[in-house]
Structures are given as C-alpha cells and as structure tokens.
Image (cartoon, coloured by chain):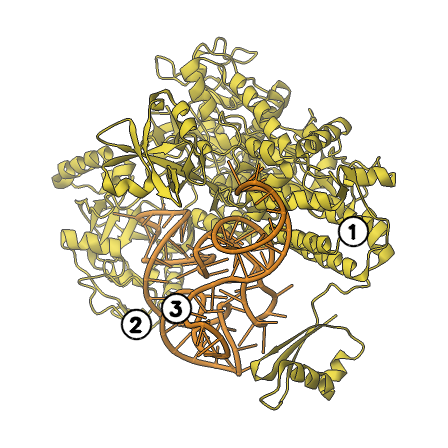
Amino acid sequence: MAYEFNRIDEKWRKNWADKKTFKTEDNSTKPKYYVLDMFPYPSGAGLHVGHPLGYIASDIYARYKRNCGFNVLHPMGYDAFGLPAEQYAIQTGTHPAVTTEQNIIRYKEQLDKVGLSFDWSRQVTTSEPSYYKWTQWAFTKMFESYYDKEENKALPISKLISHFDKKGSAEIKTACSEELSFTKDEWKSFDLKKRDQVLQNYRMAYLDDVPVNWCAALGTVLANDEVKDGLSVRGAHPVIQKTMKQWCLRVSAYAQRLLDNMDQLDWSESMKEVQRNWIGRSKGAQLEFPVKGQDLGLEVFTTRADTIFGVSFMVLAPESDYVSAVTTDEQRSAVENYLEECKKRSQRDRMMEVKRVSGVFTGSYCTNPFTKKEIPIWIGDYVLGGYGTGAIMAVPAHDSRDHAFAKKFDLPIIPVIDGEASENVQEESYDAKSGKLINSDFLNGLKVKEAISKMIHRIEESKMGIGTINYRLRDAIFSRQRYWGEPFPVYYKDGMPHVESLENLPVELPDVDAYLPTEEGAPPLGRAKKWENKEGHPYELSTMPGFAGSSAYYLRYMDPHNDKALVSKEANQYWKSVDLYVGGNEHATGHLIYARFWNKFLYDLGHAVEDEPFKKMINQGMIQGRSNFVYRLKSDKNKFVSLGLIDQHEVQKLHVDVNIVDNDTLDLKAFKSWRPEFKDAEFILEENDGVSEYKCGWAVEKMSKSMFNVVNPDTIVEKYGADTLRLYEMFLGPLEQSKPWNTNGIEGVYRFLVKYWAQFHDGEKFSISEEEPTAEEFKILHTCIKKISSDIESFSFNTSVSAFMIACNELSKLKCNKRGILGPLTVLLSPFAPHTSEELWELLGHTTSINYAAWPNLEEKYLVESSFKYPVSFNGKMRFLLELPIDLSKEEIEENVLKNEETQKWIEGKTIRKMIVVPKKIVNIVIG
RNA sequence: GCCGCAGUGGUGAAAUUGGUAGACACGCUAGACUUAGGAUCUAGUGCUUUACGGCGUGGGGGUUCAAGUCCCUCCUGCGGCACCA
C-alpha cells in the first residue's frame, strides 16, 4: 500500500500535455477570466522554491475559476532579454540567445513538474523577433505621438504638425520638455533639422540630452528604479550622474492619470502607496522673484506659498540655467570653484553626506514681491536641478533644509507661523503645517491651509505666478548601451532619427563578434557589420531596457500568433484586461508603472480596449533562504566546531550547503565530499541526549547561490510529489507575507496526503462505497466546500488547506469513503492530484473529462442531487441581552434562553447552529 | 523626517460583523505495536497552581455586558520615499 506520487504525477503530466487540457479557446460563451503571473527572467540558476509560490496560488485560483464555469486564460512566458545572459556572454563568448534558450528549457521542465495548468500554446518570449516586433512597433507609435493636455490623451504627431502650420505654437497645451514659442511663419521657415528638434520636444518617445545614471561597470545607463542608494540594483556597481543623448519616454505626461486611476484598482494599499510616492504629486504655486537690476525673474516652485513673508534668501541648483545670468563678476571665480566641486561629488556622495551643507553666494539680489525687501541669491547643491524650476525660495524658519543652510551661512531667519513648537525657530525650524500666520500682512491670523490657498489666489490675481502641480515622476530613459535587448527601430538620415514602418519590422538584433563596447566607446551594436536599413541608413546603436518587453506582454497572450497586430480587436475585446495579476511587489516602481503607462498610451491610440491593464493584484511574499553555517577554528583550518561549543574557540563562520544539513545537524560524510578542501575535515562534536553530532548555526537570508541556501522545487517534488510541494507552499503562511523556507512541516502535509490516499484505497485497490453519504458526512463536506470557496476567493490559501485537512480527517474518522464525497473533495484543491479521482472517473465512466472535474458538473451530479439540505452558512447571528439569576450553570442558561419569549420569536422555525454562553449572561446564537 | 504594514504558545500560524483566543500543522511528552524506530496509531501539550483557581494576544490607558479586533499613547520590527522645496 503506497502513495506513488511519482507515477501519478507523471501520468497526469503526460495526459495533460497529450490532450492539451489547458489550451484556452478564444470563442466561448462562458464568461472570461484572465489570471496572469509575472513572467520570470530565465536565469541560469533555475527556479528555486520561492518562484512557484505565486504560480501555485494563481494556478489554484485559475483551476477554481475554471471549475466555476469561467473560460480562463492562464498563460506563461519569459522575460528573456536581460543583463545576466549578456554578462555571461561577455565572459564566455556564448551568444546570449543560446544560454537563454537553455534556461528556458530548464524553466519549462521545472514549471511542469509543479503541475501548473498553463496554456503553453500561448507562450511568449520577449527576445523572439516575432514578439519584439510589437515592442518596436509600440515605440514607433510613441515616436509618432504627442500628449495633448486639453484632450488629456496621446494623439498622432501629424495633428500637432498641422497645428504648427496653421498657428505656430500658439494655443497648444501639450506635455513637453520645455515650453517653446514660435509663430506659424517661423515654423515654416525652420529647416528640417530645426523642425526635428522642435518635434523632439513633444514626441512621446524623444531624443534628448539628459542627465542619466551612468554605470561604468555595466557600461550602460540605468533608469531611476534600477538604481538604489547610488548603486545599480543588479550587481551593486557605483552609478554616477552624467549628461548623455538618450531616447526617453514621456511617462511624466501620464503622471496624473496614473495617480487618478489608482482608485479603481484592486491592489494592496501598500502597493498603491508605493506608486503614489513614486509619482510624488505636490500641489503648490510657481511664481517669479524679480532679480534686482536685471530684466529677469527667478521662477520658483513652492508648496508653502503661505510662508512667502518669511523668505530670506533664494537658492539655485548648481545646474540651474539662472546661475550664469545672476553671478556677478566679483563672485564669478567663487561660483565656478563651487560648481566644479559639485560636479566631482557623485550622486552617491551627495546621498552619503546628506547632512553636509554647502553653497556659494552669486552676488545678486532679488526682490520679494510681497515684502519688497531685497534678498540674496545663493547656489546650493541641496536644490535639485531636475525638480520644479531648479530654484527655490528659502524659508529657514519653516523648512529644516533651508534652516541648516541659513545657519551655516548666517542668513536671517524670519518666523511667520505661530505654532505649538515654533518659539524656537532660531535654533530649529518649525516645518509642521499647523498654526496661525504672523508677520505676514494680509495673511495674519489665518491657519496655514487657509493661508496657502489665499496666497495662491493672490499670486494668480496679481499675475506673479500660477497655482501648479509638480511630480517627482520623471520621463523614463529608454536607451541602454547593451547588446541583449530590443534594437530600436530607428535609423538616422542626415543625422535625424526616423522610425521604420510596420512592414519593415522587426529590426532584428544583429550578430556581433564580441559583446563589449567598441574601441571608440560605442555600444556593442557598433560592432555589427552592416547595421543599417535597406536604404543604407545607419541604425541606432543602443537597445531598449528590460522593462520594454514586459510592458505589453499581457496583451500579446490574448492573441500570441497574430502577425498583423499586437493583438486583434476581437481577441482584445473578449479578454479585455488582466483580472488577476500575481507577482512580487518589488516591481511597484518599475514594471508596474511602465506597463500602466504603456497600456494607457495604446489605449489612447485605440490599440487597447481598457485603460488599466491589471484590475486586481496579489503580491506574494518572498521566500527567503535559511542558510546554515559551520564554524572553522582560526587556528586550524581543518577543524570545525559544533555550534554549542563555539564560545570556547576562536572561530570563523562559513556558509554550508543546506542540502547536506538536516534539522541543523550536519551530515559529516557529505560535508567531507562536498568540496575538496574539506575532505580531511575534523570535527569537535557536541553531545545531545547521548548522541554526538555537529550542530550548524543558521540565519535567514535571501535565497541565493552564493549562500548555498537555494532549495530547488524539483528535489521536493522528487521526494514528496507535486501535491505535497503545492499544499505545503500554500500552508506555509499567508501568501502575501515573506517567510523563510523551512521544511520542518512538510512531513505533516505529506502524511496527510498519504492518509487521504489510503482513505480511498484498500491495499493497492481503489476502494469506494456507492452508498449515499449520511447527513453528518454531507455536513462535513459542505462546510468544507463553503470554507474553501470563500478562502480561495479571498486568497487565504493557508486556511483553505487547513479546512481541507480538517474535513478529510473528520471523514476519515467516520471511515467514510463514499463516492459522493470524494469527487468534490478532490476538486477543492486538487493540485496535481487526480490520483484518486482518476480512478474514480474511470469507474464512473467519465474518462473523457480530462479537465477532470468541472465545478458546475459536480454541483449537478453530487451537490444538487443530494442538495444543500445541511446548513453551511454561519450568517444570521443574533444577539440577546437577558437578565438571569447569577448562579446558573451553562445548561440552565441555555434552557432559559430558549424559554425566553423574545428569543423564541427569533429562532422560530430556524435551526440553532451554535450557542455561545459567556459570563454575565450574554448569549450569542447562530441560526441556520 | 514623511508614508504604509505588522507585533498572538517552543515554532509556522488560525480567529467573518467586537462574542468560548491559540483552529490546523510542526515540535515536544507519555503510551501502544515493534528486533529496532527517524514507520504507524492513541492520548496530552498557552503560562501558572498539588488542586480549586488565577493570568494570558508588544507596554500603558480608554470605550463596552464583552476587545487580538475599536479609540488614545508609547515601544519594537519590516517595507517604501527622501535635501522633491
């Protein structure tokens, strides 16, 4: 009598592949449901047990939805362009396509072993020309579009050009790099080159000189979300600021829509919050401070218009355009020195020494338009060039950064707000937005918020400036100086960029002799022979970044083999958008912003039917590794001390492969053969209950090859079967929570499955009773179905596994092996495991039902037939407050409750499911 | 600094609307069957107390007949943003 999971897994894996069980049809009268996993980057390390966590959850959900009568789209693919394959190519000379291909094969094998119900016929791979054709196509559309702020959507650039022909730049409201002003005659007089420059200012995909994050070690620029604390996210190499000509996407045009539409999204609050932070909307005013003795005004942005009477100096960013205009001759050399110094400090240095205050006086003054007082203009590197206008009005009394600057350079601090802790503004700034205005003329006595709106109103009235909104979100830099990415469908003619038309797409990635920059420092594509289009015009040398291919892949799954369009209207109309998106929350500021942007752009142009791509999202937590350590004597490199004894020695901690450690006990023999340098290792063991053993230390760390803590799903599947892995991963805890991988409980799940299997087998023989289940048995079943259904709907997979176990254990106690129970029970979670229902279906003559248990069918066959006559709902609770003698026993109270008139009125004709009697005579009755 | 989330046995964790806290599982203890047990089964297992009982959801306070759950406050941990004006 054995539970042969290997045989069962294999049989069904084959069956599903042969019969294409999970192939999804587009034309169905059933309602659609689209369940999507974030597709993986196929890395050389293969899948670890953390990957399947989300896949298993989405798979259970997809199966559940299918069984509820939905036509479910549940595809999988690969985000195949990326740095690791290219780094590997640089080292070994192997073409990244080759390694990627190998990795994909391995990933597919591993995914199959977990028994996931993907429709593999729809697989997309971002590095395949048939796929990146559409990534390139979208780019060409962006190149040929601009963002109209009036209509609040992207429009074809031809529209803008005809506007320029008629009216020049007058009356246009667009998202642009800078506000330009020209007449129609001027426009007509522009030569092609000039026109091109003008248009770049408006295109959704444009070429511009921009400050970029340059990573010398990787030889490429990086997007803001690819940099953390001044280091590259991949590889942790230093990143510096540098100005380069790059392709950019005008993501900022969509800032407000990205923010607004968030309210409709069923995403976790924290996820939305991260996006809100990233977009960083701040409302305020932009106004001009006239520069003394010049016909020039300093434009500043402030969210604290109320504090204008407290402005005591101005600060410009070192890279500000104003700098040269306001620097006086006396100050010129000091300013130049300072600018030089700023350039040397990298982004990272600036971040490391946040507290360091530096700056220089320009020599000029401007006039505060309200106080009419003269205030000095300074330069300071705490003001950022890229945000707002690159210039600020400093209010040291109520802004801690301005305060620090004022202290350092001994500038006046003028309090204008009287708040709770504002007495001490000379020593410490009072930043809070509460209190009342003082020293502020017409604002005196107003609360801060009132003062802000009154001031903005006044500024607009007097035409000094306007109320405006700034976003932290910047345009995405879209060029990478790398090989393994989508080539741009861009060629240069007379030095001007043009995009290829659809019939010339895809522009295929050329072969190169090495994956490094050229000797002249051009990107690797510079090495390609004949890297030019049909007319002999040279192609763009950089490639697209990682997020390009992942920005519209969910649309492609709807219609993956279409070579006329990214997705056909019909397919898109049917599948619309993703109903459930499952993936890690680390993509909050990258992929999920870009994909939303990309989708909105396609929506504006009518290429996508829905504005938002991902309706609902669930973020599975990370599964961390549990690393093990051995302790080597510092004095003797061959001796290892058990954890309990390390206090007595000088030791060095070393990672040890978790696969040769069981329950923190080291397998000594395996350790010696693990690595050649340990073959003669000696051990100082500790004594535990009469057993001498080597205990290892442990720590929770990220799962990674270098820490030897990677657990592979395959090994679990081989040892326990796919069902155990799946149930166990779900049982581990709440899906959204990060948790360390530990196998301590896996035996419990395995034991459960063995027991469950045995319940329906007599020895080797499948054994099932045709008897009608009893009321009690049905009650167990229906309670379980109810609980599991609602748990799956709310993504509480851990409790749903528990409910499953409870039901099975209860039925097993009743020795129930009736067929009326088995079918539904198997279906509930039925991960990989038709192991019992398989034979069940054969016995019942349902062998054609490969998707072995459609929920509605079961409902008809088993549930409706036997009917829900046993209450499963726990709703309808009532509360009573009764006055009863104090010393009654529980039974007596219950009796009194039932006799009570009020109570009787309520429970008349209903079944009492549960009665709770607690001290002080409060009863809680649950009726069915 | 700002924002978000969390804190429950030895462990992973349950607990619809406030209603018997600790389901389920691991571990542990005892017993059964066993040559053996790292197999299987049975019973027990929050802390404390010989017992009756008392105490228990990070600390303190509050609302309530009733608080893990609601309110105030403090502490700790995790995540995000960060010279963004």
For disc 3, the chain is A
Q: Which chain is orange?
A: B
Tell me the CA gap for discs 3 and 1. 67 Å
Residue A887 lies in quadrant: bottom right
Residue drawn 29% across the image and 39% down it: A321
Ranked by sequence position, the earlier of labels 3 and 1 is 3
Image quadrant holding the N terminus of chain A, namely top right
On the image, the x and y values in percent for residue A34 come to: 68, 42
Of the residues shown, which amino acid type is indicated by label 1?
A: Ile
Residue drawn 22% across the image and 43% down it: A326
Q: Secondary structure at mark 3?
A: helix
Q: Residues within 10 Å of mark 3 (few under 14, many from 20)?
A: some
Left/right placement of residue A356 relative to residue A238 reads left
Name the residue beneath numbered marker 3: A450
Asked whether disc 2 touches disc 1, contact meaning CB atoms under 8 Å apart, the reply is no
Name the residue beneath numbered marker 1: A821
On the image, the x and y values in percent for residue A378 come to: 20, 47
Judge whether B34 appears above or below B51 on screen: above
Q: Residues within 10 Å of mark 1 (few under 14, many from 20)?
A: many
The label number, if any, that marks residue A516 in the structure image: none
**Residue nearest the observer in this picture, A860 or B42:** B42
**Residue nearest the observer in this picture, A28 or B18:** B18
Q: Secondary structure at mark 2?
A: loop
Q: Is residue A114 visible?
A: yes
Residue A61 lies in quadrant: top right
Residue drawn 56% across the image and 43% down it: A746
Ranked by sequence position, the earlier of labels 2 and 1 is 2
For disc 1, the chain is A
What shade does chain A have?
A: yellow
Name the residue beneath numbered marker 2: A444
